[in-house]
Image: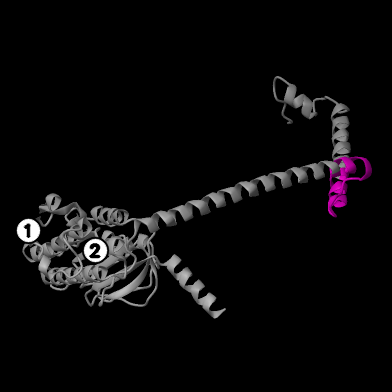
Amino acid sequence: MLKIFFCFVLTLAGACATGEFVVLHSPDSVVFHGNEEIEQSLLKEVFAACLGFTVRQRGMWEGISITDPFMLPEALVSIAVEGVDVLDVPHGKKFRLDVDEIEETTWQAISGLLGERDNDNKLVRIYLGDGLDALGQSALGELKPAPIDESSLKALSLANEEDRKFLEEIQLLRAIAKKVPTAITADDKPDVYWLVVSGLRSVLDLHGNSSIAAKEALSLLNDAFNAINEAFMKAYDGKVVITAFTNDASQVRHTRSISAGRQRRDAQGDRNKKIESMVESSNTEFNSNKIMKKDQWNHAKSYSADYPVMFNIFLWFGVVFVFSLLAICIAIADMDPGRDSIIYRMTSNRMKKDN
């Protein structure tokens, strides 16, 4: 029974947290703490808070604290690794990540959020899967990656297309790290650098997640992370937040399909509730009609306790008013229209005055 319960807990944890979010570096003014899970759709709010912008969803995540609002980071560097669930990073603060959107959606959200505040921000996204042909002239300038030293490889091979593409991305990461100190100048305006690694999934599919080639690929990726970390820390004098997170598009589609199915079930449930309410209202109306018909033949109307009082007030007031009006009319009809009469005085051509 205990083993079944343990397996259930692991399955539930895997279903709730499909990725990993790692903070590689943050200045003293921004502290990441705890182990609370975070949704990827909230990363834009976390990144905006790191750069000093007002977040739209307050109390969204308890894993970040701003200790010094006057020494905020000047840049954000985020590395998205596609197709995997976990990064074997030996250092950094790690959080479980609920992958509920693709990385490009997160990038568009954070770039749009910063773009609408200030047009002078550097917003750079580099998709390393495009290769050197597409990234020769990047937003950081001309990139010149070093040739791949095949003799240093243990299990990976340039003969495999999957391995070669991943190694090219690693070389591009190193070239970016080499270019950063000369291409970037801190200007006290928040900048965002978004790097996307897409070749690791193919290597894991080819060799297996527990293979020597997979471990070598993760080791090369961690070395590239360290190079990026050191380069941006040097360029911004440590006032930079550097993160990495995993993003598996298949998990996103699975989450969306579950959400869509849940929405369909909720919609069907709403329709059933509407039908039930309509049937119930029809039954109520039918029963009320029956009661009305029954009351019409067998029961008198029900009155409140104030009805006799109000009835007597209106009855006797009406009686007194009618007889008073009748007496006034009779008195005016029997009045003598003489010279001293008010009728004579008002109808005469010339008003009479008593001497």
Is residue 66 visible to us here?
Answer: no
Residue topped by disc 1: 144
- Residue type at mark 1 is Lys
Mark 1 and mark 2 lie on one chain; the one further toward the N terminus is: 2
Residue topped by disc 2: 79
Q: Is residue 56 left or right of residue 149?
A: right
Q: Main secondary structure of the magenta part?
A: helix
Mark 2 crowd level (few <14, some 14–19, many ≥20, 10 Å Cα): many
Q: Position of residue 267 (x, y in %)?
A: 56, 48
Instruction: Please check the rendered image and state whether residue 314 is part of the magenta-colored stretch, yes or no.
Output: yes
Image mark for residue 244:
none
- Residue stretch rendered in magenta on the structure: 291-316
**Residue lying at 20% horizontally and 73% vertically, measured from the top left:** 71
Q: How is the image coloured?
A: one colour
Which element carries disc 1, helix, strand or loop?
Answer: loop
Q: Is residue 222 left or right of residue 138?
A: right
